[in-house]
Image (spheres, grey):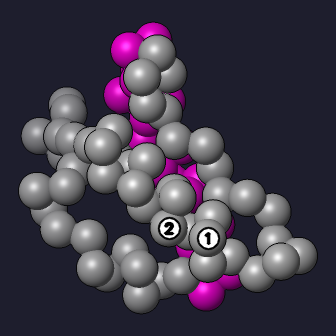
Amino acid sequence: MKKICLIPKYCNEFENKLKKSKPIDAENPPIPLILAGWNYSSDSEKEQRWIDTIEWCKKYGFEAELELLNDDDFYYGE
């Protein structure tokens, strides 16, 4: 099993935290795949959205936020 992305509950909380703290001139972080987005997306789509979120964090200086996440906060797939 490999780490795919944050569990929807944590993904939504994480995205809200990023949006509140982002620089004024920064684009919004990627929209998390939750609710219907979660149900109708594949593991590879979920993983790509998480990769996009990681890249956004690196671009805007939120690497420390990524380090605060726990392994239990993640969804695992094959």
State the residue in front, 68 or 1.
68
Which residue is tagged 2?
17
10 sits to left or right of 24: left
User: Label 2: few (<14), some or many (≥20) within 10 Å?
Assistant: few
Q: Amino acid at mark 2?
A: Lys
1 or 26: nearer the eye? 26
Magenta residues, as a range? 38-61
Q: Quadrant of residue 40?
A: top left
Q: Which residue is mark 1?
A: 20
Q: Secondary structure at mark 2?
A: helix
Residue 78, image x, y percentages: 19, 31
Residue closer to the observer: 45 or 17: 17
Q: Is residue 38 left or right of residue 74?
A: right
Query: Within the magenta stretch, is there residue 14?
Result: no
Seen from the viewer's position, the closer of residues 4 and 23 is 23
For the stretch drawn in magenta, what is the main secondary structure?
Answer: helix
- Residue 8, how many percent across, how many down? 33, 39
Q: Residue at x 73, y 58 (%)?
A: 28
**Looking at the image, can residue 4 be seen?**
no
**Any mark on residue 34, and which?**
none
